[in-house]
Each structure stands twice: as structure tokens, then as C-alpha cells.
Image (cartoon, grey):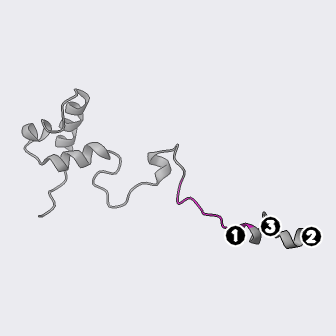
Amino acid sequence: MARSAFLTPAEQANVDVMHQLGRKLHEMPRQLGRSRDAIRCYVNDLINYGKKQKLPQTTQHPHLPIGKRRKFTSATLQGIGLLRNEETND
């Protein structure tokens, strides 16, 4: 199936108004004549809608940490001097 075209600025404004009025997602496509998925993608990600590259995570959700959580192994901690071998303590 081919990807549908992005919503026009006028359609985006209509979706914004309907969303603020509390219209349900399945009611909006009937009035606009667009697919439910096109409207859902716009409503779920207003900041990045229609952009190829997403904004950094800090701009979208400042309370969430950035990047992968690092897994520290004993070898890693030992390498940076935070963990000492039991043999060296004797």
C-alpha cells in the first residue's frame, strides 16, 4: 500500500480544533476525508510531523534520560578504578 500524503496546514488546523473539542480519532477522518492513520500520526507526534529527522529526545521529553543505559560489568568498573580485586586487598 502506498503512503498517503501529509496533512496540509489547513487540515492540521482542523485536526487541532477537533482534538481540542474532544472529538474521537475515528470521527475526524469522516469529516476531513483523510485516513485515520494520517490523522493518528499527526496527533501522536505534533513536533516531528512531516519531518525526516526527529528532534533530539531532550526537546521532546526533557524529563527522560538520553541514550542507552550503560551496563557496567565488573571488568568495566575495575578498569576505571571503582572496583578492586579481592586479591589486591590481601
Q: Secondary structure at mark 1?
A: helix
Q: Secondary structure at mark 2?
A: loop
State the separation of the CA atoms marked 2 and 3.
17 Å
The quadrant of the rendering that contains the C terminus is: bottom right
Q: Position of residue 87 (x, y in %)?
A: 86, 73
Q: For mark 2, what is the residue?
A: 90
Q: Are marks 2 and 3 in contact (CB under 8 Å)?
A: no
> Which amino acid type corresponds to the residue marked 3 in the rendered image?
Gly
The image position of residue 79, as x and y in percent, is 75, 72
Residue density around tag 2, few if under 14, some if 14–19, many if 20 or more, within 10 Å: few
Q: Residues within 10 Å of mark 1 (few under 14, many from 20)?
A: few
Name the kind of residue labelled 2 in the image. Answer: Asp
78 w.r.t. 23: above or below:
below
Where, by quadrant of the figure, is residue 22 drawn?
top left
User: Residue 74: within the magenta?
Assistant: yes
Residue 79 versus residue 73: which sits nearer the camera? 73
Cα separation between marks 3 and 1: 9 Å
Task: Kindly identify which numbered label has been placed on residue 81.
Answer: 3
Lower sequence index among marks 1 and 2: 1
Chief secondary structure of the magenta portion: loop
Disc 3 packing (10 Å; few <14; some 14–19; many ≥20): few
Q: Which mark is residue 76?
A: 1
Give the quarter of the image for residue 85: bottom right
Q: Is residue 74 left or right of residue 88?
A: left
Are discs 1 and 2 less than 8 Å apart at CB? no
Which badge, 2 or 3, comes first in the chain's sequence? 3
Give the residues in magenta.
Answer: 66-77
**Residue 70 in the image: above or below residue 48:** below
